[in-house]
Image (cartoon, grey):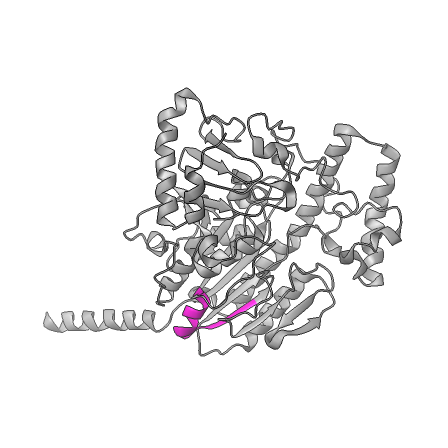
C-alpha cells in the first residue's frame, strides 16, 4: 500500500512540476472597432465569420465581455496595464501618451521567462514601447494599403500590400524565428475594421447583392437622452460621401484622401474602378432624404463587412499556424476587439457611448485542457481582467496595483466570485461630440452620469428596454432603484479610486 501511495505521490509531483515548468504560450489578437453583432458566433446573419467561430467552437464564447472606456488607445492601455484609464494615464486619443514605465503585464511575463512581441496596431502615442523583446507596429492608426511600420530602434519601414495580410506575415515570421526554448506572448493588433473601411482587393463587392435590414432603432429620435441629441456620429449627417464611402467625381478628389493616394497604380485602378461604377449608379438615382441615408447605410455595411472578411481570414490563418506547428495544445488564444461598434443602431457608426453596442465587445478564447470546446461564459468580464488572468495562467506575479480580476478560476471551475456590477468611464470631449460620462451596469439596470458637454443622468431598465431608448431617470417609480444604483456606483468609484468621478458624482445638475 505504501508503495502505491509513494508512486502516486511521485506521479502527481511530476505532473505538477511539468505544468509549472511548461507555462502556456499566449496569443492575443486585438481588432479595432469590430462589432459583436457582425459575428456569426454571436448569432449574426449579416455575414459568416468561420475563423472567429472556430475559436468559439474549440474554446469559449464570452457573451458578456465589456470594456472600461470605449475608444481605441484607452482600451489597449487598459489591456496592457490591468488598470482603468484614470490610473494608467491614457484617458483619450487626443491628449494621452502611454507611460510604459508602469508594470504592464508583458514586463511581468518577461520576468517569468517569457519572450514577448507586439505586431500591428498599438496606437498608444509616441513613447518607445517597453516590455517587448520585439515589436513592429503601425504608426498611429496605420494604413490599409502599403503601410509603414515602426520596429525596434524606432526604425521605420515601408511595405507593399494589404495591412491585415502583412501583419499575419510578420507574426508568422516572428513565431518561426523566436527562441524556441522560451514560452512566448504574441500580441497581434489589427487595424481592421477601423474607419475608413477599405476592403482587400479580392473582397471588393463580396456583399454587393446583399441588402441589410435597417436596425429597429435606425430612426431613433433620442427623445429622452440629451447627450445622444448632440452627438455627431450619424450615418445621415456625419458619414462622408467621399472620405467614408469613396464616392468621388474624379481621381484628383480621391487622391486628396491619403489612404487612397498611397496605393500603387495597379491597386488604385482596381479599387477605384469598383467604386466609380457605384458612384455612377448613385448619380443616376439622384437620391435625397431618407432614401440617401439608407443608401449610405447599405454602402457602409458592405464596406465594413468586406473589410472584416480579411480580418476573420487572418485570424484563422494564425490559429492554423499554431495547429500545424504543434503549438495548439499549450497556447492560450484570445480574440477580442478594442470595443464594440454601431452598425446603424440609433442611426450611428463609431463607438464611445456606454450603450450596449459600444460598451460590449466580442471575445473568444481557446485554452486546450482548461476550456471545454463549445463553452459559453455568461459572467461579466472586462478588458481590465485579461492582464491578471494571463499572468496567473503563466504563474507570473500580478502587480498589487492591478484593478482587474483574474477569471482563470472561472475557466478552471474553481472558486470564483463573479462581478455583479461593471464600471465605465469615457473621457474624450472632442470628435463626434460625445459627452464624457461614467456609469454602472448591473444585470438589469444601467445608470449613467454625463458631464461637460451635457450635464445629465440617464437610467435604463435593460429588461424592459434592451435598446436603451427610454431614459427613466427621475421617475417616481424608480426612486428606490435609483438610490440603490447611485450607492453601488459610488462604491465602484471608490473601489477603483476614480477621484474625478467622485467629485462629479456629488455635483448637482441644474
Residue at screen point 51% across, 75% down: 133
In the image, taking residue 377 as reference, residue 124 lies left or right, namely right
Residue at screen point 58% across, 39% down: 453
In the image, taking residue 510 as reference, residue 443 lies left or right, namely left
Residue at screen point 52% across, 76% down: 178
Residue at screen point 74% across, 55% down: 202
Chain part drawn in magenta: 104-118
Q: Quadrant of residue 21?
A: bottom left
Q: Position of residue 37 (x, y in %)?
A: 57, 41
Q: Position of residue 365 (x, y in %)?
A: 46, 55
Q: Quadrant of the N terminus?
A: bottom left
In the image, taking residue 404 as reference, residue 283 lies left or right, namely right
Is 158 situated above or below 365?
below
In the image, taking residue 2 as reference, residue 497 lies left or right, namely right
Task: Inspect this view and state whether residue 420 appears.
Answer: no
User: Is residue 70 rendered magenta in the image?
Assistant: no
Q: Position of residue 438 (x, y in %)?
A: 47, 42
Of residues 232 and 48, the one nearer the viewer is 232
Q: Position of residue 506 (x, y in %)?
A: 41, 38
Is 242 situated above or below 80?
above
Amino acid at each position: 500500500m505504501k508503495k502505491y501511495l509513494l508512486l502516486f505521490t511521485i506521479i502527481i509531483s511530476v505532473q505538477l512540476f511539468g505544468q509549472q515548468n511548461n507555462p502556456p504560450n499566449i496569443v492575443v489578437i486585438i481588432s479595432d472597432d469590430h462589432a459583436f453583432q457582425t459575428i456569426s458566433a454571436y448569432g449574426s446573419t449579416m455575414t459568416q465569420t468561420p475563423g472567429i467561430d472556430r475559436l468559439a467552437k474549440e474554446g469559449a464564447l464570452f457573451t458578456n465581455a465589456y470594456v472600461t472606456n470605449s475608444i481605441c488607445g484607452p482600451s489597449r492601455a487598459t489591456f496592457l496595464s490591468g488598470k482603468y484609464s484614470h490610473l494608467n494615464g491614457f484617458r483619450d486619443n487626443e491628449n494621452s501618451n502611454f507611460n510604459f514605465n508602469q508594470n504592464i503585464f508583458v514586463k511581468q511575463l518577461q520576468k517569468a521567462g517569457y519572450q514577448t512581441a507586439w505586431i500591428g496596431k498599438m496606437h498608444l502615442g509616441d513613447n518607445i514601447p517597453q516590455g517587448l523583446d520585439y515589436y513592429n507596429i503601425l504608426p498611429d492608426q496605420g494604413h490599409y494599403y502599403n503601410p509603414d511600420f515602426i520596429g525596434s530602434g524606432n526604425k521605420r519601414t515601408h511595405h507593399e500590400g494589404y495591412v491585415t495580410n502583412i501583419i499575419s506575415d510578420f507574426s508568422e515570421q516572428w513565431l518561426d524565428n523566436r527562441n524556441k526554448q522560451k514560452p512566448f506572448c504574441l500580441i497581434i493588433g489589427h487595424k481592421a475594421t477601423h474607419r475608413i473601411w477599405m476592403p482587400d482587393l479580392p473582397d471588393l463587392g463580396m456583399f454587393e447583392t446583399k441588402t441589410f435590414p435597417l436596425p429597429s432603432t435606425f430612426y431613433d429620435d433620442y427623445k429622452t437622452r440629451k447627450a445622444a441629441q448632440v452627438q455627431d456620429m450619424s450615418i445621415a449627417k456625419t458619414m462622408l460621401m467621399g472620405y467614408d464611402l469613396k464616392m468621388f467625381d474624379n481621381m484628383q478628389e480621391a487622391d486628396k484622401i491619403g489612404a487612397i493616394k498611397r496605393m500603387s497604380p495597379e491597386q488604385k485602378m482596381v479599387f477605384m474602378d469598383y467604386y466609380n461604377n457605384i458612384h455612377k449608379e448613385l448619380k443616376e438615382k439622384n437620391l435625397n432624404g431618407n432614401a440617401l441615408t439608407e443608401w449610405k447605410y447599405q454602402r457602409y455595411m458592405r464596406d465594413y463587412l468586406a473589410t472584416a472578411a480579411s480580418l476573420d481570414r487572418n485570424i484563422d490563418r494564425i490559429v492554423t499556424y499554431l495547429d500545424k506547428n504543434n503549438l495548439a495544445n499549450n497556447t492560450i488564444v484570445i480574440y477580442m476587439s478594442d470595443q464594440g461598434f454601431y452598425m446603424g443602431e440609433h442611426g450611428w457608426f463609431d463607438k464611445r457611448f456606454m450603450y450596449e453596442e459600444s460598451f460590449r465587445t466580442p471575445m473568444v478564447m481557446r485554452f486546450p485542457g482548461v476550456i471545454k470546446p463549445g463553452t459559453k461564459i455568461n459572467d461579466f468580464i472586462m478588458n481590465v481582467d485579461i492582464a491578471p488572468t494571463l499572468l496567473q495562467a503563466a504563474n507570473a506575479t500580478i502587480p498589487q496595483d492591478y484593478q482587474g480580476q483574474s477569471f482563470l478560476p472561472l475557466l478552471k471551475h474553481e472558486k470564483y466570485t463573479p462581478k455583479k456590477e461593471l464600471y465605465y468611464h469615457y473621457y474624450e470631449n472632442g470628435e463626434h461630440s460625445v459627452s464624457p460620462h461614467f456609469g454602472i451596469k448591473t444585470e438589469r439596470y444601467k445608470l449613467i452620469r454625463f458631464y461637460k458637454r451635457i450635464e445629465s443622468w440617464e437610467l435604463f431598465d435593460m429588461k424592459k428596454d434592451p435598446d436603451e431608448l427610454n431614459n427613466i431617470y427621475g421617475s417616481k417609480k424608480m426612486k428606490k432603484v435609483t438610490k440603490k444604483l447611485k450607492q453601488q456606483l459610488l462604491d465602484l468609484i471608490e473601489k477603483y479610486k476614480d477621484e474625478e468621478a467622485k467629485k462629479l458624482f456629488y455635483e448637482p445638475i441644474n
